[in-house]
Amino acid sequence: MSKNSIENERPVISCLNVWKVFGANATDFEKEKLDNLNENTLTAKKWTAAVCDVSFDIGRGEVFVIMGLSGSGKSTMVRCMSRLIEPTSGDVNIEGENLLSVSDEKLIEIRRQKMGMVFQHFALLPNRDVLGNVAFPLQVQGISRKEREVRASEMISLVGLEGRENFFPAELSGGQQQRVGIARSLASNPSIWFLDEPFSALDPLIRSDLQDELLRLQAQLNKTIVFITHDLDEAIKIADRIAIMDQGRIVQIGTPEDLIMRPANEYVARFTKGVPKSKVVKVSTIMKPVAGNHAKTSSFLNINDRVADVADILTKTQEAIGVRNDGGDIVGVVDRETFIRILAGADIK
């Protein structure tokens, strides 16, 4: 379960039994008995299934990462979710509305009003400056020039490009160009944000900076984010939950800690093998309970902190450290021995 609980709220995005099949006569796909569909049937029909029977829900404000190796189906899946690619079968519901049954006009309206999209290739308009690029979606919506430029200026400031409004894309670095793409995708204030490997073409340092920028923006804006990546470190850094895909199917959905500590199968175990436990294990997992709201300690951690992120605090004291929840209540303590065991990669007892 993500930090943004979805238990008591209808999902913002709900995908049910989504398939995307390519090949001759793929339109006949729904005539097949899906319960009995297997690789032999697909091969016999000369079909290739890029997305196979995928189902999941995404809650409001959740950062949901879909990841997998090249060819796993992750990018096809996110395009099915926005109907940039037409799913062969299944349902995609956006805030309770089935995207696959709406008219083309309604689909355009939903995309303009509810969805922001950022892709690996920036696709900036070379003949427009930064302000013009960011304001472009608002111009398409028919918003007045004054209003759209005010909104665009706000977004440019939000992503740290204030002062570069009159620069053209060719005058910007790769990281700055991607920030323009991010600002443009946010200009219409979408509730849902699709990001398909947005940082993969960038240098590692710039990529890390933009990951931090994404987290900063999310803390301010609380969007529902679907983020596609093949980079497990990136997924762990930004995700509330991760869905791992393999050959078009989702093999496990869970928090970063779930995937590292409790892999569903050998594929997930191999996929996550090199990740240090301290990068994903939260303080809440290793803390010990305390009686009442009292702990004999002068230092405190947050229940959602990951061990690696608070290593400096833990190594500077010999005493147990208190743990507080988001409301400030003391809910446990972490002792030095347990902390050192996790840093060393030992299993949690």
Image: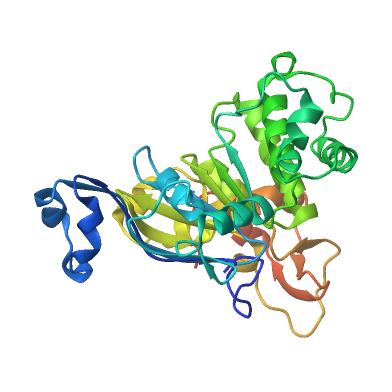
Residue 347 horizontal/vertical position (percent): 47, 59
Looking at the image, the residue that sits furthest to the top is 171
Check the picture and name the quadrant holding the N terminus.
bottom right
Horizontal relation, residue 33 to residue 118: left or right: left
Tell which of 210 and 50 is nearer to you: 50
Q: Is residue 331 visible?
A: yes
The colour scheme applied to this rendered structure is rainbow
Q: Position of residue 204 (x, y in %)?
A: 60, 27
Query: Percent position (x, y) of residue 295?
Result: 80, 74
Estimate the x, y position of residue 155 in percent, counting from the top left: 81, 40
**Is 115 in front, or is 54?**
115
Q: Is residue 127 left or right of residue 71?
A: right
Q: Quadrant of residue 299?
A: bottom right
Q: Could you say which quadrant of the image residue 7 lies in?
A: bottom right
Is 226 placed above or below 92 here?
above
Please give the count of numbered marks on the rendered protein.
0
Q: At 61% from the left edge and 47% from the top edge, which residue is drawn? A: 237
Foreground residue among 256 and 283: 256
> Does residue 347 appear in this view?
no
Q: Which residue lies most toward the bottom here?
A: 292
